[in-house]
Image (spheres, rainbow, N blue to C red):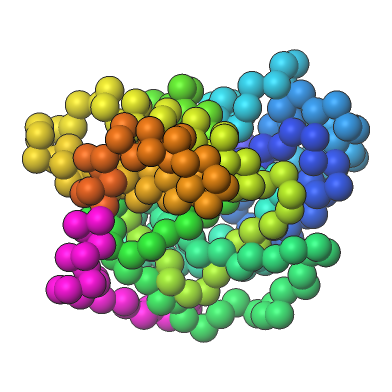
Amino acid sequence: MSPARFSIIITCHDQFHMIADTVSSALAQSFADKEIIVIDDASTDGSCELLGAFGDEIHLVRLDQNHGMTEARNAGSAVATGDYLVFLDGDDMLKPWALTIYDRIIRAYDPRLILANLTWFEGEPPRPLQLDVPAEIRLVRYENVVEKDRTFRSCGSAIVADAKTFASLGRFTKSVKWMPEQDLLAKFAYHGRTIQIIDPCTVYYRLHRTNTIHDVPKMIQGCYQLVAAAEGRIEPAGLGARLRSYPLIGGPAFYGVKRAYRAGLYLEASKLLVRAWPSVTAAAVARLSANLFGHRPIETIPVQA
């Protein structure tokens, strides 16, 4: 079997009432050159049996122990054959033409990283309002992700990565359990062209009570892991390059500080701010600079080349 252009890597743990929607959204992609890999991270709620019903339509990997989403994603990437890895959490869904959009961007720009945009929803999965492929894509092009100057909701389902670059950077960092997507962006800092999609949104992001964003202690823990991982990396051009990459860490860290403060965890918020102050300051300066001097321009390309 020839390698797929896209490997959709779905990870799940005890998401019985959501995982079928997620897998079905991957199977419904109008783009044919794909494989669907599902990593069941030792579910105990019947998810694994439910996934078995998809048969040969998916490549199902069952983990004997619960390792968490970071290692589950790495397990999926280890068996993937695609040129690009499309990560999809077990509670989210792809819109039916998502891969078509990604393929058009790849043919136009040959990026190492694509940052997708999200449509948020609660309750029952929405039916796509637009079944036909959108006519155009609005996007921002950066030669490296370190140049990103627009807000990005960094969740796993919004990341499409060049498989070879992803592997060369060591995949997701095992020590970063709760904010691995933000850490991955920092690892990609100087490793090639990044495209940020402004419109259309290609992913349905499901809001529910077990989202990590609702678990503030885990978020705080993730911020500490994120900062520690960044400090342990050696940037290719020394201190200047490290400083330029600080906003990739400082933005998420400051968000964690705000969430802790709003939750009444004032001491924890203060400690985190002290720990992450260099990157938080860099993120604030970068945002102020973008507001004063303008953002990178938005480009528009037709979906049909």
Seen at 61% across and 32% down, the residue is 69
Q: Quadrant of the C terminus?
A: bottom left
Say above or below: 198 vs 284. below
Question: What percent of the width, then of the height, locates residue 303?
Answer: 47, 76
Say which of 206 and 138 sits in front. 206
Say above or below: 76 vs 119. above
**Residue 291 among those drawn in magenta:** yes
**Residue 15 among those drawn in magenta:** no
Seen at 45% across and 51% down, the residue is 258
Q: Quadrant of the N terminus?
A: top right
Seen at 28% across and 58% down, the residue is 148
| Residue 228 visible in the shown view | yes
Say which of 252 and 95 sits in front. 252
| Residue 61 visible in the shown view | no
Q: In this view, does 288 lie to the left or right of 176?
A: left
Question: What percent of the width, then of the height, locates residue 163?
Answer: 43, 39
Q: Magenta segment range? A: 284-305
